[in-house]
Amino acid sequence: MFFFLLNLALSDLGSICTTVPKAMHNSLWDTRDISYSGCAAQVFFFLFFITTEFALLTIMCYDRYVSICKPLHYGTLLSSSACAHMAAAAWASAFLNALMHTANTFSLPLCHGSALGQFFCEVPQILKLSCSQSTFRKIWISLFVTCLGFCCFVFIVFSYVQIFRAVLRIPSEQGRHKVFSTCLPHLAVVSLFLSTGFFAYLKPPSFSSPSLDLAMSVLYSVVPPALNPLIYSLRNHELKGSMWAMITGWFQEH
């Protein structure tokens, strides 16, 4: 689990560094400019890190499923080499997905201006600027993302159904509480990530507005990567104790 958390932390850091520094720079200098190549690079790296994060969250769900439902087979199914192979597959598939989507998106001619209604270069906003002849390619991109996300979503739902069935069979209330405290933060992050991401990419045009698009983009691109370290760190008792001591010490001084 700590190996997967390390990979998740790296993907979180990468996705935050891809979007937030440029947005802060534009806000401080009161500008909204970004070069064409810079926009393409931002799209690639954002898709790369965000897809990696989704793949890692799915793998971490499998880790929980094996540890709770098949604990005697944990060492075999999730050996060091198996974990390394799964993490490498997550990064490699994310790279291919980002490369394919970036190449496909920026091969479309832009015929409706060059102003994005977003704080970073987002694929749905770029597709709005493309010509009407590219409708099929827009639909193809949406379908590919939907199928990929749906497959991972079905796997996560199936895993958690099996996990909760196993939890309900645990006679000890303390044991059930321990399992729920392990799974619920992960489930909350996955739910927020999937719901906002699907809505941002697949919402009907009638539900589109600049303020709503901005809110949805922040929720799936900034909030989950920012909350992941906090959610998983607060399960560490030493860290919680240190934070509580720091907070109480600050109040005592002031």
Image (cartoon, grey):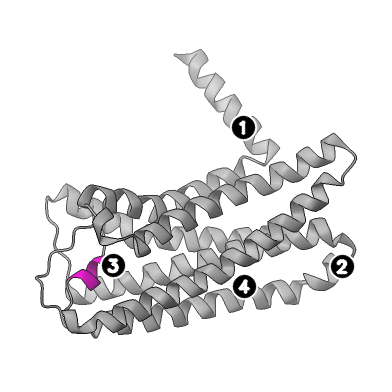
Q: Secondary structure at mark 2?
A: helix
Q: Secondary structure at mark 1?
A: helix
Q: Which residue is mark 4?
A: 87
Q: Which residue is mark 1?
A: 242
Q: Secondary structure at mark 3?
A: helix
Q: Which residue is mark 2?
A: 73
- Most foreground residue, 155 or 1: 155
Q: Is residue 96 above or below residue 23?
A: below
Q: Which residue is mark 3?
A: 124
Query: How busy is the neighbourhood of tag 3: few (under 14 within 10 Å), some, or many (20 plus)?
Result: some
Give the x, y percent position of residue 70.
Answer: 85, 62
Q: Is residue 144 above or below residue 221?
A: below
Q: Nearer the viewer, mark 3 or mark 2?
A: 3
Give the quarter of the image for residue 37.
Answer: bottom left
Main secondary structure found in the magenta portion: helix
Q: Which residues are magenta?
A: 123-128
In the picture, the quarter occupied by the C terminus is top left
Q: Nearer the viewer, mark 3 or mark 4?
A: 3
The earlier-in-sequence mark between 4 and 2 is 2
Which residue type carries mark 2? His
